[in-house]
Amino acid sequence: MLDQECQQALLDIHNILMTWNTDEETVLNGVCEKLLAYRPYLLTWVGIGMDAAVVVKGAAGGVAPQLHLAVLNLSSTDRENPITKCMRTALPIWLKNGLVMLENDTIKALPPDVPVAPAILYPIRNQDRCYGVLCVMAKTGQGLTQGDLMLLEVVAQHIGFALAMMRVFAARNETNEQLKLAAAVFDNSLEGIIITDGNGAILAANAAVVQATGYSKEELIGSNPRMFNSGRQPKEFYASMWEAIMHDGQWKGEIWNKRKNGEVYPEWLSISAIPDNQGVVTNYIGIFIDISKQKEAERHLDYQAHHDALTDLPNRVLFNDRLLMGIAKAKRNDQSLAVMFIDIDHFKYVNDTFGHNEGDNLLQAVAKRLKACLREEDTLSRMGGDEFTILLQDLTGEGTELVARKILDAMKLPFNIGEHKLYVTASIGISVYPKDGDKPMELLKNSDTAMYRAKEDGRNNLRFFRSNMHEFSVRRIQMEEDLRHALKREEFKVYYQPQVDLVDGRISGVEALLRWERPGVGIIPPGQFISMAEETGLILPMGEWVLRVACKQCKAWHDQGWRGLRVAVNLSARQFQQTDFVDMVAGILSETGLDPECLELELTESIAMQNAAETVAVLHGLKRIGVQISIDDFGTGYSSLGYLKRFPIDRLKVDQSFVAGIVEDPNDAAIIIAVIALAHNLGLKVIAEGVETGEQLDFLKMHFCNEVQGYLLGRPMPAEELAEKQVFTL
């Protein structure tokens, strides 16, 4: 729907165009000046004529329209110019920098006195005849809004009709042929035209009226236009309309009328009083356009403006509006409400592994599952990316927590996306009105802060907002900023934890572990910053740096006489999914001179199983350059023994959660015995991590585990400390 300013502009322009006995140039100049008065355009002009012979008949603005017209006429050497195309196709033509946006066109440069700004051409037509074009150029740095386009389209239509009527009325006394033309224009106009006598009885109605109303001409002639009254507007509306007609001689506006079949529809209507030479009104002319399609388009645009295109959920704008109304209702009724901020954990991995199409399908499935957890009166919104928000009206804290846990439980079930079965979790932050804020942005910000705390606490859980979380949020922002500069400032260090062979007690390998020496804080373990590095994408340069440093250090130990020592480097999912990952590893090995057999890359089974088919291909690529491969945290994810057989791996690494209980828990002991037997039968070696007691060490030796690592044998340490001891007495 046209806004009030556009409606007023259209009313003024229509008043100008209704002066059918005035010369064309005066009318068109008036139209251009009115457009410029209501909208901050750089230039408006109307060109009348045929194709390249179009000449400027009306203009307003600070740019020479004739110069702009000349440039457009020469703007293409291979195809028809934009003016010709606009008039031939009867379609608007978008112009970029004042010229047409067509592929493969050779565009001549604009003269220096023609500004660079976006513009559009609209055809000026009536029936099958095109009279010329309406051109509007926006100011530099500004665009044309949807309201601009709706206004300009209607103005172009009105100019076409007015030109036709002006030419008919100017020649009405010349010949009968011209009278016939006037009749043709009248009867074939796209606008509905009704002419009544001074008492309101219909004298003439064109075909457009018949088509719009459903009444035949016979039914219309002699009737009063009151027959179209829909009853949708009050009596005061019509009283005001006729007061304007009597006082000003004209009225324009939007009105709801009724068709013969009872259907109510919107019109843009203009009514003009026609007086005789003595000033007595002898006739009224009503011109209207059925704007049903425009209304439907407006509703569609409004829906699009307030809903997410992917999930069809309310978007950020609509959610904020409902939250504002919800707060007002809660305040009025002395109730509470809750805002949930939900983020899908590690969603980037899904996009990186399976592609954005599968990621979009997953978001749609998540939206449906979230909606199924809510009441009809609750509002679920997609804020963007993998972030969702929920407005829960009139719920206690206990009720809100029940809903949140219901969501977490629902998210644990697998999502069947295409040929894949995906497992994802969510982190939920919650803020409550009025305790945590009484304004929409405050509640959203606090629930977002609580969500990040849920992520920091391990993901797949929920957290209610607490006032001390602001301090946590500030620290997190500072940490992220510091993390971005840490590589450049050389604040990262690589520590090494020994891996000991249980046969001879020698250190057969080391695991490279990243540490951050944050100024003013000290050593920060990876558990406190790796997740942030993954979210920000910094994990890629960090991972490459660790790999290069570890390979360089291992080669240095070899040169010092520590032959055969291997170094194990952990991989993140984002590293492993790099398309050039194998080439990057090969390049670092070549650069550092390390024997590929002395490099072991560790990936968790959850990473390996995210896209098992692609994992197999990458692992085979690594094996071709001679790198060893181990599966970390074995037994804690969703392992597939079928894929385990296909993976070209060298070691299984038993997770420390099983090692911790092997002495007290028979189940843990049985699992470790089974993993060792399985690995040996597949020709793989086994390394157990997290060994902290002599009893654990003895158990693993007894059951022929190949290697161990843990605090019992050595904590992660700088390279110079590790070199001091190469053999342990077991």
Image (spheres, grey):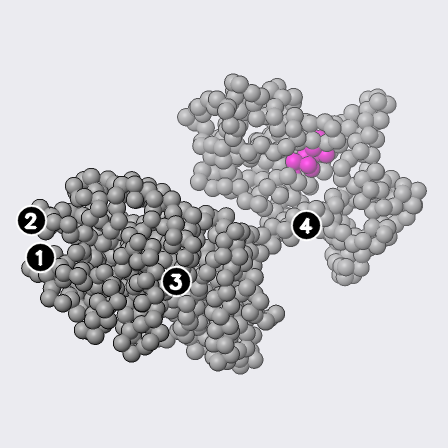
Q: Which residues are magenta?
A: 155-164
* Cβ atoms at labels 1 and 4 below 8 Å apart: no
Of residue 421 and residue 97, the one placed in the foreground of this image is: 421
Question: In the rendering, which numbered label is found on residue 723?
Answer: 1
Under circle 4, the secondary element is helix
Q: Percent from the top left, x then y, of residue 88?
A: 65, 25
Instruction: Read off the residue under disc 2.
Output: 560
Instruction: Read off the residue under disc 4.
Output: 296
Q: Which residue is located at x 56 percent, y 80 percent?
A: 333
Sequence-first disc among 2 and 3:
2
* Cβ atoms at labels 1 and 2 below 8 Å apart: yes
Distance from Cα at disc 3 to Cα at disc 4: 52 Å
Under circle 2, the secondary element is loop
Question: In the rendering, which numbered label is found on residue 637?
Answer: 3
Distance from Cα at disc 2 to Cα at disc 3: 40 Å
Of residue 39 and residue 432, the one placed in the foreground of this image is: 432
Residue 315 makes an appearance in the image: no
